[in-house]
């Protein structure tokens, strides 16, 4: 192990212990506030409330041009269990990704992953002609898991995030989609793919710029 590797590893652990994940905190607060608004305006499991507040629904997008639903739907949740489960995931993995990529790139990864999840979900619905009212942060959160694949590739972080751990995380994320509950597995899958591609772009461009394996902080 050379001195450069030791320095980069120490930089990562030092930053992780000092810098606050402000974007993760902000996303948590936004999701909770939106959920409270859902409850006030008819209930988080009320289909009409979800539609009124911007849930994803292809007929509304195609007929009324409400493309914003692909974005707003990632901040809505269908019931308290849905919200709590997603927020636990956000708190568990968000800070790691935010520490690694920095606040701005982390925000980009989160939001674009959510849009990728929405896009793949709608694409499959168009193919099957089965349309659902869809909502949740799962696509964006899946994108964070996708971004974590980079951790297993970078010498400075793979000690803490081995490829085997990442594979287990991804499996746990996708398995519920094959169960009886109506989990939108396409949103998960779209988020994972989108998150990995965006994160790899950030990682590769930074690596190429520095002509080293120095990670982005």
Image (cartoon, rainbow, N blue to C red):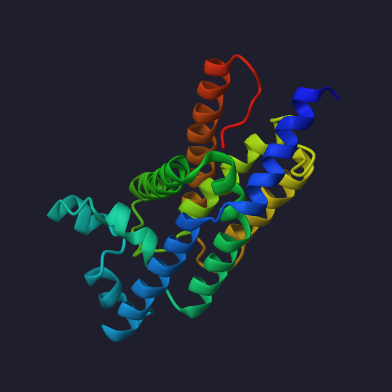
116 versus 50 height, above or below: above
Residue shown at 34% from the left, 83% from the top: 39
Quadrant (top left/top right/bottom left/bottom right) for the C terminus: top right
Please state which of residues 161 and 6 is positioned toward the viewer in this rendering.
6
114 versus 212 height, above or below: below
Please state which of residues 10 and 188 is positioned toward the viewer in this rendering.
10
Q: Give percent across and percent down for residue 102.
A: 51, 42
Please state which of residues 32 and 2 is positioned toward the viewer in this rendering.
2
Q: How many numbered callouts?
A: 0
Residue shown at 56% from the left, 28% from the top: 203
Image check: 74 left or right of 178?
left
Image check: 28 left or right of 17?
left
Residue shown at 71% from the left, 36% from the top: 152
135 versus 38 height, above or below: above
Q: Give percent across and percent down for residue 127.
A: 37, 44
Residue shown at 57% from the left, 51% from the top: 19
Q: Give percent across and percent down for residue 79.
A: 45, 78
Residue 42 visible to the viewer: no
Residue 58 visible to the viewer: yes
50 versus 2 height, above or below: below
Quadrant (top left/top right/bottom left/bottom right) for the N terminus: top right
Outermost residue to the top: 211
Q: Give percent across and percent down for residue 89.
A: 59, 62
Outermost residue to the left: 64
The image quadrant that residue 14 belongs to is top right
Please state which of residues 117 and 25 is positioned toward the viewer in this rendering.
25
């Amino acid at each position: 192990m050379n001195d450069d590797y030791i320095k980069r590893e120490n930089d990562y652990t030092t930053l992780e212990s000092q810098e606050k994940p402000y974007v993760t905190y902000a996303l948590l607060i936004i999701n909770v506030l939106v959920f409270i608004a859902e409850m006030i305006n008819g209930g988080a499991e009320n289909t009409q409330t979800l539609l009124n507040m911007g849930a994803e629904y292809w007929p509304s997008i195609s007929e009324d041009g409400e493309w914003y639903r692909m974005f707003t739907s990632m901040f809505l949740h269908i019931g308290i269990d849905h919200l709590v489960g997603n927020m636990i995931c956000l708190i568990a993995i968000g800070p790691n990704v935010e520490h690694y990529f920095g606040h701005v790139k982390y925000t980009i990864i989160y939001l674009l992953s959510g849009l990728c999840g929405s896009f793949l979900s709608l694409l499959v619905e168009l193919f099957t002609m089965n349309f659902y009212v869809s909502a949740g942060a799962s696509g964006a959160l899946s994108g964070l898991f996708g971004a974590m694949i980079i951790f297993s590739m970078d010498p400075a972080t793979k000690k803490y995030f081995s490829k085997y751990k990442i594979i287990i995380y991804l499996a746990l994320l996708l398995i519920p989609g094959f169960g009886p509950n109506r989990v939108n597995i396409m949103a998960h899958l779209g988020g994972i793919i989108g998150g990995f591609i965006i994160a790899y772009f950030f990682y590769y461009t930074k690596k190429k710029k520095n002509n080293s394996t120095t990670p982005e902080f």
